[in-house]
Image (cartoon, helix red, strand yellow):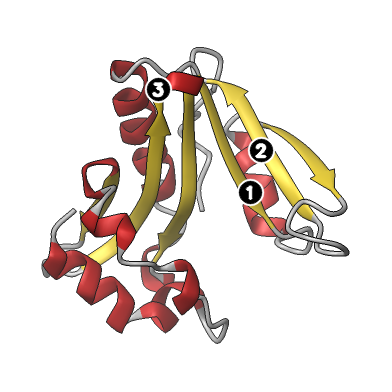
Amino acid sequence: MTKVAFDEIVERLPAFWGHRDLSALHHPMFFHEFGDSAFVIRDERGSVAAYLFGFVVPARGLAYVHLVAVREDHRGRGLARLLYERFGQLARERGCDRIKAITTPGNSASIAFHRALGMDAVELPDYAGIGRARVVFSAPLYEMAVPSNAKA
């Protein structure tokens, strides 16, 4: 990921996330420190249509997806699936054998998408602090299905 892409994403967050303010989750470390494991897909005009911020922890064999988003006008085209495929490939190359992501319990679209990828989903009541439940997704990288109909 380039600085230009990161800046474009941060400037246009509502196009990806609607009215939810997720600016705090878009920390610059995902460009500066983990930019080689962050990916973008650009549309025909050259604008960012989808992105994935992730990082790998080879010592634990873990690939973690922090954020994956598709611009509202590009949803349903399989772009999030393509980003997961690329990130999974990178993670395997770096010695990872598991992938993990999280979401909030009310994010039904994210839960359905990750389940369609073949990931297990477990709701943990205090994952993000007391009373702050999260749904934790995980799967072995070698078993994670990425069917062509898994769209975000």
Q: Quadrant of residue 47?
A: bottom left
Asked whether the beta carbons under mark 2 and mark 1 sit within 8 Å of each other, the answer is yes
Asked whether the beta carbons under mark 3 and mark 2 sit within 8 Å of each other, the answer is no
Point out the tag, 3 or 2, that comes first from the N-terminus: 3
Binning the other alpha carbons within 10 Å of mark 3 as few (below 14), some (14 to 19) or many (20 upward) gives some
Point out the tag, 3 or 1, that comes first from the N-terminus: 3
In the image, taking residue 35 as reference, residue 22 lies left or right, namely right
**Amino acid at the residue labelled 1:** Ile
Residue 17 position (above or below residue 108): below
In the image, taking residue 109 as reference, residue 83 lies left or right, namely left
Residue 96: percent from left, percent from top: 43, 19
Residue 143 position (above or below residue 11): above
Figure label count:
3
Residue 56: percent from left, percent from top: 39, 33
Find the distance from the CA under tag 3 to the CA under tag 2: 18 Å
**Amino acid at the residue labelled 3:** Pro
Name the secondary structure under disc 3: helix
Residue that mark 1 sits on: 102
Residue that mark 3 sits on: 58
Name the secondary structure under disc 2: strand
- Front residue (pair 144, 37): 37
Q: Name the residue furthest bottom.
A: 19
Q: Residue at x 78, y 58 (%)?
A: 105
Residue 107 position (above or below residue 125): below
Residue that mark 2 sits on: 137
